[in-house]
Image (spheres, rainbow, N blue to C red):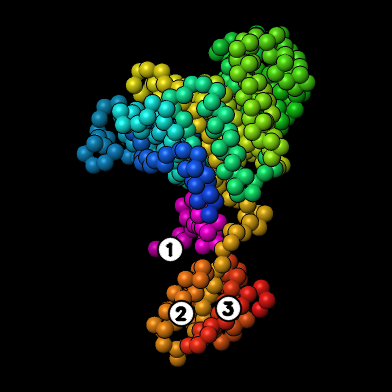
Amino acid sequence: MKVNLNPAKGMRDITPQEKEIRDYVEGVIVNTYKQSGFELIETPVVENIENLIGSKGGENLKLIFKILKRGEKLDFAKEGFTEEDLADLGLRYDLTVPLSRFYCNNRANLPSVFKAMQVGNVFRAERAQKGRYRSFKQCDIDIIGDGTKSAELELIATTAKALNALNVTDFVVRFNDRRVLKAVILKCGFTEEEFDGVCIIVDKLDKVGLSGVEKELNEKDYSLGASANLVKALESINDKGTSCLVEYGVSEEVVKDVEEILNQSREFADGKYDVEFDFTLIRGMGYYTGSIFEIAYKNLGYSIAGGGRYDEMVGNFIGEKIPAIGFSIGFERLVNQLMDEKFKVPNLEKLVLLYESGDKYIDVLKKADDLRAQGYTVAVYEKAKKLGKQLNQFTEYGYNKFAVYSSEETEVKDLSSN
């Protein structure tokens, strides 16, 4: 039987060079979050299927990897047998649903305001393409138990600090609020039942333009008057920003909240990055209840981080309202972009120590440890006959120093000068 050596579709192998960058990026993010008081937790990749399906995860609910029941639990002879009978577990599609369950299960031992951090792989059975995988890593920070604007401000500031620590500065924090979206869309004449469908169309504004949004609205079975009102609202909000929201049905209290978050976040940014209001920011998760935000980096056609407030999800597990909000860095997108920019792990001294076949190997290992004590990361290899070719290979692997073993003094040289 021919063996397929490729990873499963939508999955991928990670080379040593990429893994080095990934580990560094993850370490910087985690350390920044720890310094900001967020506690690292870990949840299983497998969740009870009812928790995933009942989570209002938008389109992601169609992408859940379901796990078949085991052994005698799988009864194909059962009358009326359906897909729901096949699976009782699934792979998590994000880190928010597991966190909500974790909090409810452990809340007696957690502070009233819990600041959590998670780093881990999530799984979505979507169509695999460049930059989009079926298994990918997320880095989340969440605050549970704080319903004030302080939570929004802290999450935006802390996520931005993590990116700045990676020397990522050319980005924009885009901010909106689901309460603003709903008020404006309903004020224009749409119904509650039409809200989600209208949001999907508005979300395409940056791709199809205002005329494209108007065309798609008119192609649907919506009131032409409501569609025309919304097009005017989009034009007005684009020109005037938050100053015209009250006339479109948004309460003064909500407008004040949005403006305070924007102004204070800009003050914290101090010019290192931009913070802007974006009425067309939707985000696909149905569980968002208030603030939503994304980080756009350079001219990429996608965000590298996103999140929002989900005040109802935690309470759905235990029947009481508990405020919650989270921000997730799109780890894969960030790493891919850094690699495209030829990112190098800073201050990393990788040295290859070469030896001859006649050298006493235990002495070579001792010499390697001496070099490690000097701060080098050292790999030991036998010297090849074609030294130049061998050194070029190690340069490609990310090594920047080399030395040839000597029982006396071993000289360290730069690979770039070879």
Q: Which residue is mark 2?
A: 367
Percent x, y for residue 98? 39, 34
Most frequent secondary structure within the magenta stretch? loop
Q: Nearer the viewer, residue 117 or 239?
A: 117
Asked whether the viewer can see residue 284, the reply is: no
Q: Residue at x 58, y 58 (%)?
A: 345
Circle 1/circle 2 CB separation < 8 Å: no
Helix, strand or loop at label 2? It is helix
Residue extent of the magenta highlight: 1-23
Name which residue type carries label 3: Val
Q: Which residue is mark 3?
A: 412
Percent x, y for residue 415? 63, 74
* Circle 1 crowding by C-alpha within 10 Å: few under 14, some 14–19, many from 20: few
Determine the residue located farthest toward the left in the rendered image.
Answer: 72
Along the polypeptide, which appears first: circle 3 or circle 1? 1
Name which residue type carries label 2: Lys
Q: Residue at x 62, y 44 (%)?
A: 164
Marks 3 and 2, Cα distance to the nearest angstrom? 12 Å
Q: Which residue is mark 1?
A: 2
Left or right of 86: which side holds 301? right
